[in-house]
Amino acid sequence: MFATALTPTSAAQALWGMSQKAQCTTGRYKYLAIHMHEPARQRAGTGGTHAAFASAQRKRKKVEALFAELKNLIGYVAAPTFG
């Protein structure tokens, strides 16, 4: 895909004329909250695009299927959870 220049739609054209002050909050304190583990979250978000992630995901699915079959064979029934 190629990036193209964005042109405002008719609904958004009115907002483009607004000043930045009008778009800000009116509270006394303004801050931007960033999660303390944001770098790890960013890496996890981009991990799904790699070929290694896709092959690891297929391997995990195979192992999960084997464990599910084993649980069925031995008659495992999960204990009920309350709460």
Image (cartoon, rainbow, N blue to C red):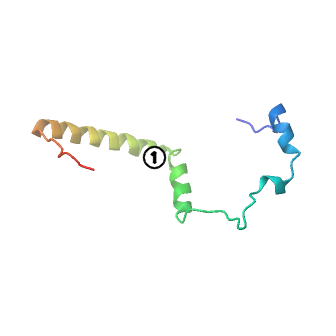
Q: Position of residue 53 (x, y in %)?
A: 45, 46
Residue name at image x 34 percent, y 42 percent: 59
Residue name at image x 74 percent, y 57 percent: 25
Mark 1, other Cα within 10 Å: few <14 / some 14–19 / many ≥20: few
Does residue 6 appear left or right of residue 39 in this picture? Answer: right
Residue name at image x 71 percent, y 65 percent: 30
Does residue 70 appear left or right of residue 58 in this picture? Answer: left
Q: Is residue 44 above or below residue 31?
A: above
Q: Position of residue 55 (x, y in %)?
A: 41, 42
Most extreme residue toward the top is: 10
Most extreme residue toward the right is: 17
Of 48 and 59, the residue lying toward us: 48
Image quadrant in which the N terminus is located: top right
User: Mark 1: which amino acid?
Assistant: Phe
Looking at the rendering, which quadrant does residue 29 occupy?
bottom right
Q: Which residue is mark 1?
A: 53
Q: Position of residue 49 (x, y in %)?
A: 53, 44
Q: Is residue 48 above or below residue 39?
A: above
Does residue 44 appear left or right of residue 12 in this picture? Answer: left
Q: Is residue 5 above or below residue 42?
A: above
Of 7 and 32, the residue lying toward us: 32
Looking at the rendering, which quadrant does residue 10 occupy?
top right
Image mark count:
1
Q: Secondary structure at mark 1?
A: helix
Q: Is residue 70 above or below residue 47?
A: above
